[in-house]
Image (spheres, grey):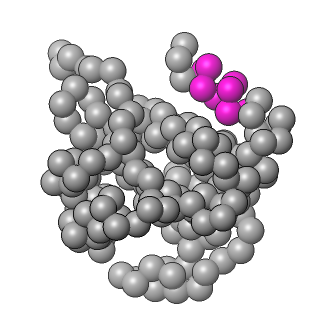
Amino acid sequence: MVALFPIVIDDMTVEDIPAVQAVENASFPVPWPANAFKQELTQNKNAHYIVAREGDRTVGYAGLWLSLDEAHITTFAVLPEHRRRKIGERMLISIFERAQRLGAEWLTLEVRASNLAAQRLYEKYGFRPAGIRRRYYSDNNEDAIIMWTERLRDRSVRDRLAKLQAALEE
């Protein structure tokens, strides 16, 4: 039996980039280069990134950009062998909390039209399809579905998040 450590969500640092790059490479056909993460962390004052750790191993990460009153989830990934263990949900809750602390009114993202598992996760957390970006993904020209939440300060959004977070802690 393999011992599992609790998942800890932390702010991403430059020291995390090699481990984040490993998650990126395992998750996407056209991964971001490591220097893109370094630039995001050191040069983009509107960028906010987190990592999910199990013990001392990075198993996921996510990032958002704050633009006025919108928080745009730019990237989100969990190592394939760690999926379906609620790590993505823990990171998504952390992203919601971060966006609210930063004063964002809404969260938005793009997701591959073929990525039904991710779409279901986002819908569970209140994201709704709002449009399509045709041929958005450069590796295969796949469309992206644009998804948005309701206002983050709306009671229904806060209640949904609290209920989902409580369910994760059971």
Q: As drawn, is 106 to the left or to the right of 102?
A: right
Coordinates of residue 66 in the picture (x, y in percent): 57, 60
- Residue visible at 35% across and 27% down in the picture: 7
- In front: 77, or 1? 77
Q: Residue furthest right?
A: 155
Quarter of the image where one finds residue 144: bottom right
- Quadrant in which the N terminus appears: top left
The answer to whether residue 26 is visible is no
Quarter of the image where one finds residue 50: top left
- Quadrant in which the C terminus appears: top right
Whether residue 2 is situated above or below residue 34 in the rendered picture: above
Q: Which residues are magenta?
A: 160-167
The answer to whether residue 155 is visible is yes
Q: Decide whether residue 170 is among the magenta residues.
A: no
Q: As drawn, is 124 to the left or to the right of 11?
A: right
- In front: 116, or 97? 97
- Residue visible at 48% across and 34% down in the picture: 90
